[in-house]
Amino acid sequence: MKKVKALILRTAGTNCDCETQTAFELSGAIAERIHVNALIEKKDKIFEYDILVFPGGFSYGDDIASGKILANEVKNKLGNRIKKFALSGRPIIGICNGFQVLVKMGLLPDPELFEQVSTLSYNDSDKFECRWVYLKTEKKIKNESNCVWTKNLPDIISLPIAHGEGKFIPDGRKLLDSLNKNNQIVFRYCSKDGGKPEYPLDPNGSVDQIAGICNTAGNVFGLMPHPERYIFALQHPARKSFCGGVYGWGKVIFQNAVDFVK
Ligand SMILES: NC(=O)CC[C@H](N)C(=O)O
């Protein structure tokens, strides 16, 4: 059987790209970390891959606004190909800084529109927040939408966050309503029992506690938490697997995309 190939796009300031590579390899894929300059030199190389990943980090030092410079670079130099990749239905994920990049280049929430209509801004606390949080896997998404990344997750999972600019703000009520209506809100921060969280479990003050969104087709997904930091059960502070075996919930997210491509 053909091996699934994931491209992890890195640049100055990227982090957790190695953890992300490990997550895909453990899920049965070939994962390659490619520098953005190398991809810009051979633009069509992108179509040799089945999955595209914008990993976490502090790309270009978070200058101007986190993710903004990489978003502009990628949109200006690879925009047509990235849009084609997204509209072909291939899975794309943006993790933390990668989510900021997807939102700021406008690939989320609508790759067809490809315009920035929302942002991730400074946390309400005005500082970097780093801890484990609870996330509600939105029921509607699980039952009705085709978000390829979050299948088989329970109602509430736990993942680590680490960011200074994670406050999701859509441009206006109309957009928020349409994200809700189209089942594009994938994760919301919540309390341990799934209720509305207070700070610090609400780490940033996102509108509607939004922690992750996808496009309507469900193949492009961005989230502030770091699934690649919960691949193994032992990475959780409780030191046990909630999904059975040696793996953590983060692994399920990567496995979903690999299985989808297969
Ligand atoms: N962990 C990350 O990817 C951090 C994202 C970004 N640099 C921020 O602080 O908001």
Image: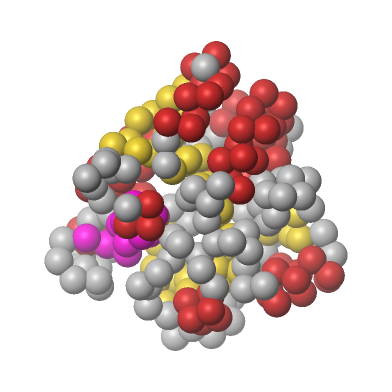
Q: Is residue 112 left or right of residue 260?
A: right
- Residue 107 counted in the magenta span: no
Q: x, y (%) of residue 70? A: 63, 30
Q: How is the image coloured?
A: secondary structure
At horizontal 63% and vertical 64% (from top left) the residue drawn is 216
Relative image position of residue 124 (x, y in whole percent)? 69, 59
- Which residues lie in the magenta part? 247-258
Residue at the extreme front: 1
120 vs 82: above or below = below
The quarter of the picture where residue 238 lies is: bottom left
Residue 231 placement (x, y as % from top left): 28, 54
Q: Which of 134 and 109 lies nearest the eye of the viewer?
A: 109
- Whether residue 20 is situated above or below residue 152 in the rendered picture: above
Compared with 232, 81 (above or below) is above
The tally of labels here is: 0
Q: Residue furthest top?
A: 41
Write the residue at 55% across / 61% down: 218
Q: Look at the picture and state if 252 lies above or below 22.
A: below
Q: Main secondary structure of the magenta part?
A: helix
Residue at (32% x, 53% y) in the render? 262
Question: Which quadrant: the N terminus?
Answer: top left
The residue sitting at the left extreme is 245
Q: Residue at x 49, y 48 (%)?
A: 90
Residue 203 left/right relative to 25: right
Residue 85's image quarter?
Answer: top right
Would residue 214 appear left or right of 110 to someone viewing this image?
Answer: left
Of residues 50 and 243, the one nearer the viewer is 50
